[in-house]
Image (cartoon, grey):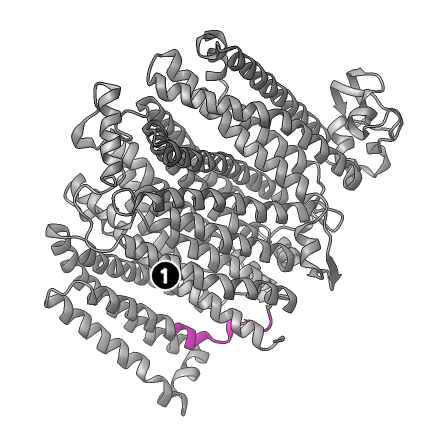
């Protein structure tokens, strides 16, 4: 089989961007959690908040480093692998990425130094400030990146001159039709993902009867957060879906594997789409529910895949199954959040071991849902890289398949090592726990009693650390 | 502002961003290059402790350089990144290894030595790749109809490799003089010896490039050795020589801060020499900054933000360098 350079370039981008998105998802949420903990510490004077904050800061540092280095790769990949996209969309997407660097990247990277190494050198308020600034920075970063990405889905505010997109109205470019939906859906996903990680870690400690005080704090905070955000995510996702139906109806058709334009349509719980015969081999569906779910009307019209020529359709199986994975994981998260809230309200959350056991193994849920969601939205836009304007096959750099294959293998090898070791080290930091060496100075060893640890931490805080 | 001066301003901004990157990440890559010479873990911790709070911010200038190039000169970005594809990718992967090593080695136990190796190896490889990229640019890129039209290994020439080694020595010098300033005891004493050796190496490479480029590239010879240019330009090599001499003297005299400043000045003179040689080409020798400029509306939109935000960014850079001023105290890190 002849190797297709476009396919390898796409595989390479899919691989590097998927690897990257895992870390910002986590660090956007974690930086906000750490800032919250530090504000609570200053507000209540309770040392457990500061100890938790510094414990999570170590984990944050490892994740952030992986996010930074994989992000730098992406910022260059537009030019190295997608130079025709860079030229076509550079006037629009370039400045948005540029503003991300100026308003967010520098902010995070610089204040991270204070956040990590400032204890003992700067006053306490500045350490707390640095954590807040980093949290705001990660959020701002998401704002610009999602503005750029959303423009590729729903481009507005530009004109095409000599085959190149030229900006006309920056407000319309940034606040393009899908941006508010995609941004809020993604930001909420980041906080939700981190909430489930914190919940899992807290549950893991409580089950092992380690650091019970910190574990309860983590579990309670996380349950309260996800009980609000998980149902909210369903609402945001639904609104995002309505927006997609309006602007990218073929993406919705692929998500639902609907071949014929019809009303009302069934809702597919599960199906096996057959792209060559343009139908589903079999399907398990709820009659007429599709229109209600997708359009919020009993008799809403859904455009079918057959409305467009086969070469203008996205890969149906990928989009359809990724969407099902996101939904399944999402509903599990909602159930886990609501059950947790109910147990908390009943006052038996910390004693319900079966629940703790389930959530202690659910740290991965957000990551899988986010990845699946991005596969839905990005594969659903195919064959376009900029919806309706530039096809993916016309966006590449002029590299041959052997060169691209070489770099793909390099990326896979390097990322596999870095990813495996990163997860291993994060797990080790979690294993050490908040009272271990992560917080205490190495020369003092780990204190045997929680009380003495709290005492030390208090003294440390009073002395300004070190 | 229009189609003539906007590209000029943007070339200036990107020029400054690249210069800042080269100096800032230069010294922390330099510390990585000198990493294998440390005797034990304590020394390695001390060395890495001098750069740990800064490296992330320093590396962000690389993103601004690349991002800025895309924003302001999309065609140049596309052509340069395609032409120098392999060295760019290898550089990025080297930076990946090196960047995660900062964090990983503080958590690692038995595998710590591998991350020490990754940190040093990544730093060396990134420095060489950056030099190769520079050399690949100076020797010119094969462009047709505004896009890259050469082969995947066009960049691989003796000249580019020589530039790679030159940048390696240069970053090593920046790192060594940084360590002289930021550490004490044996680490500082060894850094001083390294700085002297590396200074000689850097001067050697500067001399070779200064002779090689005008001989190999007629345009560069025409830029430097014609009247009246030669009258304006002779201070560049003269100042370089004086700076190198002072750097040596200051090292001999046991001064701690001036050698680092002199190393920065040396870099800036070298940089100025390259800019003088290739200006106004952004993609030598086919596309000038005006050929590749983005839409004036894009350059203007980005300029507003850049002019407003760069002073603030520089402000908090200075602030962070001020907070972490002075020698790195023993055992300072974030294990406590």
Tell me which chain the residue with mark 1 is part of.
Answer: B
Quadrant including the N terminus of chain A: top right
Q: Which residue is mark 1?
A: B22
Residue range (magenta): B274-291
Q: Residue furthest bottom?
A: B227
| Magenta stretch holds residue B289 | yes
Instruction: Specify the quadrant of the image occupied by residue B325.
Output: bottom left
> Residue shown at 83%/39% (left/top)?
A309
* Apparent side of residue B239 relative to residue A304 in the rendered image (left or right): left
The percent coordinates of residue A377 (x first, y second) are 67, 36
The one of A423 and A116 positioned closer to us in this rendering: A116
The one of B166 and B254 positioned closer to us in this rendering: B254
Work out whether residue B79 can be spotted. yes
**SS category of the residue bearing label 1:** helix
| Magenta stretch holds residue A269 | no
The one of B97 and B325 positioned closer to us in this rendering: B325
Quadrant including the C terminus of chain A: top left
Does B172 sit above or below residue A270?
A: below
Does B326 sit above or below residue A208?
A: below
The percent coordinates of residue A420 (x first, y second) are 41, 29
């Amino acid at each position: 089989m002849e190797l297709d350079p476009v396919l390898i370039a796409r595989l390479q981008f899919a691989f590097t961007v998927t690897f990257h998105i895992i870390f910002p998802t986590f660090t956007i949420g974690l930086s906000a959690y750490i800032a919250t903990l530090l504000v609570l510490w200053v507000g209540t004077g309770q040392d457990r908040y500061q100890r938790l904050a510094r414990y999570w800061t170590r984990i944050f540092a490892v994740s952030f480093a992986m996010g930074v280095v994989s992000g730098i790769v992406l910022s260059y990949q537009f030019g190295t692998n997608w130079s025709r996209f860079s030229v076509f969309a550079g006037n629009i997407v370039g400045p948005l990425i540029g503003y991300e660097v100026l308003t967010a990247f520098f902010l995070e990277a610089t204040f991270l130094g204070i956040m990590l190494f400032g204890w003992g050198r700067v006053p306490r308020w500045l350490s707390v400030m640095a954590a807040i600034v980093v949290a705001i920075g990660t959020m701002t970063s998401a704002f610009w990146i999602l503005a750029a990405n959303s423009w590729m889905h729903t481009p507005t505010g530009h004109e095409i001159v000599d085959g190149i997109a030229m900006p006309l109205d920056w407000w319309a470019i940034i606040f393009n039709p899908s941006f508010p939906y995609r941004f809020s859906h993604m930001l909420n996903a980041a906080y939700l993902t981190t909430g489930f990680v914190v919940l899992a870690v807290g549950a893991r400690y409580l089950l092992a009867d380690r650091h019970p005080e910190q574990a309860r704090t983590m579990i309670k905070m996380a349950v309260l957060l996800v009980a609000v955000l998980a149902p909210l995510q369903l609402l945001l996702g639904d609104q995002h879906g309505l927006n997609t139906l309006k602007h990218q109806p073929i993406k919705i058709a692929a998500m639902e594997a609907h071949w014929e334009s019809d009303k009302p349509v069934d809702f597919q719980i599960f199906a096996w789409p057959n792209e060559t015969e343009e139908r589903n081999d079999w399907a398990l569906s709820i009659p007429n529910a599709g229109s209600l779910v997708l359009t919020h009307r009993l008799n809403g019209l859904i455009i079918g895949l057959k409305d467009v020529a086969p070469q203008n359709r996205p890969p149906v199986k990928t989009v359809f199954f990724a969407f099902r994975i996101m939904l399944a994981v999402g509903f599990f998260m909602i159930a886990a959040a609501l059950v947790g809230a109910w147990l908390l309200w009943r006052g038996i959350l910390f004693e319900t071991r079966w629940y703790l056991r389930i959530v202690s193994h659910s740290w991965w849920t957000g990551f899988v849902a986010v990845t699946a969601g991005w596969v839905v939205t990005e594969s659903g836009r195919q064959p376009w890289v900029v919806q309706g304007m530039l096809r993916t096959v016309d966006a590449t750099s002029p590299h041959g398949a052997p060169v691209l294959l070489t770099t793909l293998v390099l990326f896979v090898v390097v990322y596999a090592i870095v990813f495996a070791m990163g997860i291993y080290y994060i797990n080790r930091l979690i294993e050490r726990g908040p009272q271990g060496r992560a917080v205490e100075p190495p020369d003092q060893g780990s204190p045997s009693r929680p009380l003495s640890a709290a005492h030390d931490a208090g003294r440390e805080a009073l002395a300004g650390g070190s | 502002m229009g189609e003539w001066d906007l590209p000029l301003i943007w070339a200036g901004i990107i020029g400054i961003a690249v210069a800042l990157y080269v100096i800032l990440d230069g010294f922390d890559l330099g510390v990585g290059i000198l990493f294998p010479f440390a005797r034990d873990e304590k020394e390695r911790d001390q060395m890495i402790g001098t750069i740990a709070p800064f490296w992330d911010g320093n590396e962000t200038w690389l993103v601004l350089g690349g991002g800025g190039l895309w924003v302001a000169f999309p065609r140049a970005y596309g052509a340069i990144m395609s032409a120098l594809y392999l060295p760019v990718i290898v550089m990025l992967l080297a930076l990946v290894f090196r960047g995660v090593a900062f964090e990983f080695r503080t958590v690692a136990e038995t595998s710590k030595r591998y991350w020490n190796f990754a940190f040093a190896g990544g730093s060396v490889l990134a420095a060489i790749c950056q030099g190769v990229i520079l050399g690949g640019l100076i020797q010119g890129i094969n462009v047709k109809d505004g896009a890259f039209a050469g082969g995947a290994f066009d960049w691989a020439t003796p000249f580019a490799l020589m530039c790679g080694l030159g940048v390696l020595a240069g970053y090593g010098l920046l790192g060594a003089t940084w360590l002289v300033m930021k550490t004490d005891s044996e680490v500082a004493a060894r850094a001083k010896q390294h700085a002297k050796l590396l200074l000689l190496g850097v001067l050697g490479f500067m001399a070779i490039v200064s002779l090689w480029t005008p001989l190999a590239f007629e345009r560069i010879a025409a830029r430097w050795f014609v009247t009246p240019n030669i009258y304006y330009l002779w201070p560049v090599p003269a100042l370089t020589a004086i700076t190198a001499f002072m750097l040596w003297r200051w090292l001999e005299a046991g001064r701690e801060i001036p050698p680092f400043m002199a190393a920065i000045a040396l870099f800036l003179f070298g940089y100025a020499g390259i800019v003088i040689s290739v200006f106004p080409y952004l993609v030598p020798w086919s596309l000038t900054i005006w050929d590749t400029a983005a839409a004036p509306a894009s350059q203007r939109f980005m300029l507003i933000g850049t002019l407003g935000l760069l002073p603030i960014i520089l402000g908090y850079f200075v602030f962070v360098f001020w907070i972490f001023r002075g020698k790195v105290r023993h055992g300072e890190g974030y294990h406590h």
